[in-house]
Structure formats: structure tokens, C-alpha cells
Amino acid sequence: MSMWIEEAWKCRYIETPKDSPALIDAIITDERGGTMRAVVETKCRYNLTLVQFQNSFNNEWLMTWTKVQNAMQIATSLGVPCVGLLYLVDEKILLVQKLSDQYGSLMAKLRVENTETQANINGGKATRNNAFIDMTNAKIYRIGKTT
């Protein structure tokens, strides 16, 4: 996905280290890497088609509200927008939604609810404030051919 983004958007996609926790997932810079263009929050979903996402999840991307707030705050402090990338791996579909502009104004329609969800990738349960981000107006990119 990152190589496609760099080629299609004429930018550099610089990820934070995968082996340690970070408040954001990546930054996007110009092609030379000299000027930051966006802070990025990325999620990959397996075994989920676009139609399933739209129907079963009401076209809403669930993310912890704290994660959204942190990413938007970092973006604002750097004077760039915050962008959410939801990658549906099996179909190679990338949904792109601007979460906030460079001034911190919320750009996505979302609702925040206190709900019980999986605590982490290893399972368990956690009750916390979660953002349900409406992806109806997200840009949809087909970054590869499905088989």
C-alpha cells in the first residue's frame, strides 16, 4: 500500500516503527521528504469487502476516540491535516478520509460512544470512548486488481 501511495500521490509515506507504540502511524511528505503534508492514521482490515463494510458496519470505521484525538492534535501542532487510511486488504481497496484540517477543525462526520470492544490484537474486552467515522464520503482507490 505505501509504495502505491508514494507513486500515485507523488509523495513519501514514512511509517512509525512497528515494534513500538506510537501515537500516529505515518506521515506523508513531499517527494523529497523535505516538507510534511499530512499525519496519517492507518488501519488494515482482512476478510472484509467494501460491500460488507458498507452494509455490516454501516460504512463506519471504528477507532478509539483517544487515537483520533492524538492524531489530530499532532497534525495540528505540525500545521498539517490528519488523514485516515482504511485499507481493505483482500480487495486492495483504500478508503481515504480527511479527519481534520491543518487548524484542527474536524472534517469527518463521526459519532463518539462509550462501547465495549476488543481490548487489543490479542483479544480481551475494553470499555472506552470509540469514534465511529462515517466513510460515506471517503475517496475510494482500487490499488490493485482483485482475483
Image (cartoon, rainbow, N blue to C red):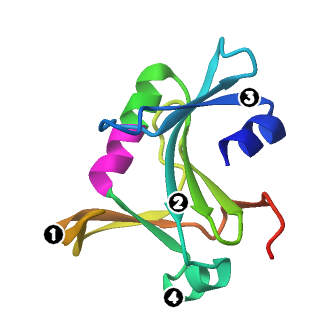
Identify the element where label 1 is drawn: strand
Q: What residue span does the magenta drawing correspond to?
A: 65-71
Answer with left or right where residue 85 lies relative to residue 43.
right
43 or 97, which lies in front? 43
> How far across and down, in percent of the image, does residue 15 sit?
52, 33
Mark positioned earlier in the residue sequence (2 or 3): 3
The residue sitting at 65% across, 24% down in the picture is: 29
| Label 2 sits on residue | 44
| Disc 3 to disc 1: CB gap under 8 Å | no
| Label 3 sits on residue | 11
Q: CA distance from mark 4 to mark 2?
A: 17 Å
Please give the label number shown on residue 56.
Answer: 4
- Neighbours of disc 1 within 10 Å: few (<14), some (14-19), many (20+): few
- Neighbours of disc 4 within 10 Å: few (<14), some (14-19), many (20+): few
Identify the element where label 4 is drawn: helix
Please give the label number shown on residue 14.
Answer: none
